[in-house]
Image (cartoon, rainbow, N blue to C red):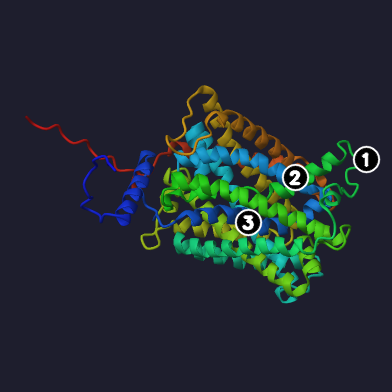
Amino acid sequence: MSMDAGPGPDPTGPPGPAGAARTQSQDDDDALGVLGYRPELKRTLGNFHTFAAGISYISILTGTFQLFYFGVSFGGPAYWWSWPMVFVGQLMVALCFCELAARYPVAGSVYNWSKTMGGPHIGWLGGWMMMTATMVTLSAVALAYQITLPQIDDWFQFVGDGSGKTDAAANAVLLGTVLILFSTVVNAFGVQLMARINSAGVFIELIAAVALIVFLAAHITRGPSTVLTDTYGLGSGQTLGYFGAFLTASLASAYVMYGFDTASSLGEESHDPSRNAPRAILRALIASFLIGGLILLFALMAVPDLAAKELSTAGLQYVVLETLGPTIGEIFLWCVVIAITVCVLAVHAAGIRLMFAMARDNNLPAGSLLARVSPRFKTPVVPAVVIGVVGVVILVININQPQIFSVITSIAIIMIYVAYLLVTLPMLIQRLRGTWQPAEGKFSLGRFGLPVNIVAVLWGAAMSLNLAWPRAEVYNATGPQHWYLRWGAFLFVGAVALGGFAYYWFVQRHRTGVLAEHRAVIKDAAPPATP
């Protein structure tokens, strides 16, 4: 067997696997330098860590258990069809993101991608929308403790007995605050601690999810044809009929399948991110679709009474306890608590990287402080604290104004879809101009790139409009009716976008530029040899 002659052993590192690892790490750092940044974050994450980050943000158990009741309430059991519908649309977005992750494996992925694809102004707006939405999402996910813990034991209802008008909301704030404080401490101590806890939690979540599918399958009492066609008669008498009710119910699925870009946002802390991040994005989304879809389907096929009103009030928690019994049911609910915990960790981690990425471009107030990397923990500590504090403040709003909070929570999802659109639309424009080139030898859609990108943009625009539609049942579920709540999505998103961009245009854009302490060091070319 012949071999091409190559360079000799590296005198600065040992041969074999250790030397290869050092070379790969150097290549990763060099790729970051091409984007203008010097490496500061510690590369410690492997394949499973990046996959776990993406799947824990999506969080199969958190999303399905938190939103099942909503889907059934507005679409009946047949709302299940929104799950594959949302998956197909988000898969188109994810495929576009895979090409970007292969070429630009950098922290704050959505911000940097929108900046690279659409220019600094689009980039700032995309990052601003995503960062605002992430902080609200952090609070929204933390609220899921209230949906699960008191159903395990009444002891977790610390405020009142749960029957008071504000007991549940106040208790949700208490439980959520404890969770966010925990997440803040863990994320401040470095990505390695967060990744270990997150990976362990995801491992438990995946095992529990598969086990739940098996247990529910063993208790099936009806066929899929019954479940998938039962609409509860919803939508009758309305202009769009059941289709209108289905679009409302689809919000339950749209809320779950996003955040897969987190796998790439940790690119500066991952090994070989240009290859691993695209794989992690797709694996996280596909695994979530398959496992989550089976849980929802088998739950509807196994519940003793498909018409039970508890399906639209107590949700999937009711199905598990009623079908599997209190002992086994509570074991699975504890696994849901673990899933909620690691989901909060992942959302918080993604927000930190996004804030750090914008700050080192001096695109946020006090950019130098926000972008400072702790020499001990090798992570941006200040963003961890700021995001945690903002998350708790948002939670406090929930104490006496749960309706307004539900409006803001729904709007957070819209802003994430809009932020994704601010990546896929400029990318489509580059494709049409013939200026987009995937990374050579890495993930590429090839000739399917243009049609996939077109569908991703159309999907993002259509779903954003569907999410924002002024439905009373979503934005003003309880009386009295207020026009500003009904149109809350347009008003809030408009205020965040216009207000934030006005600040950027008149103040921050004049200061934009990679801060000196974060800028890549450009080595001077070697002087020519003298004759």
| Of the image marks 1 and 2, the number of the one nearer the N terminus | 2
> Where, quadrant-wise, is the C terminus in this rendering?
top left
Which residue lies under the disc numbered 3? 59
Which residue lies under the disc numbered 2? 82
The x and y percentages for residue 50 are 50, 53
415 vs 30, left or right, is right
Q: Amino acid at mark 1?
A: Gly
| Of the image marks 2 and 3, the number of the one nearer the N terminus | 3
Q: Nearer the viewer, residue 200 or 62?
A: 200
Q: How many marks?
A: 3
The x and y percentages for residue 191 are 46, 59
At x 45%, y 64%, the residue is 189
Q: Secondary structure at mark 3?
A: loop
The label nearer to you, 1 versus 3, is: 3
**How crowded is the residue under tag 2: few (<14 C-alpha within 10 Å), some, or many (20+)?**
many
Q: Nearer the viewer, residue 360 or 369?
A: 360
451 vs 21, left or right, is right
At x 57%, y 39%, the residue is 95
At x 55%, y 47%, the residue is 281
Question: Do the CB atoms of the residues marked 1 and 3 lie less than 8 Å apart?
Answer: no
Q: Amino acid at mark 2?
A: Ser
> Where, quadrant-wise, is the N terminus in this rendering?
top left
| Of the image marks 1 and 3, the number of the one nearer the N terminus | 3
Which residue lies under the disc numbered 1? 237
**What's the CA distance linking mark 1 and mark 2?**
22 Å
Q: Nearer the viewer, residue 416 or 55?
A: 55
285 vs 320, left or right, is left
The x and y percentages for residue 81 are 77, 45
Query: Quadrant of residue 414 in the image?
Result: top right
Q: Secondary structure at mark 1?
A: loop
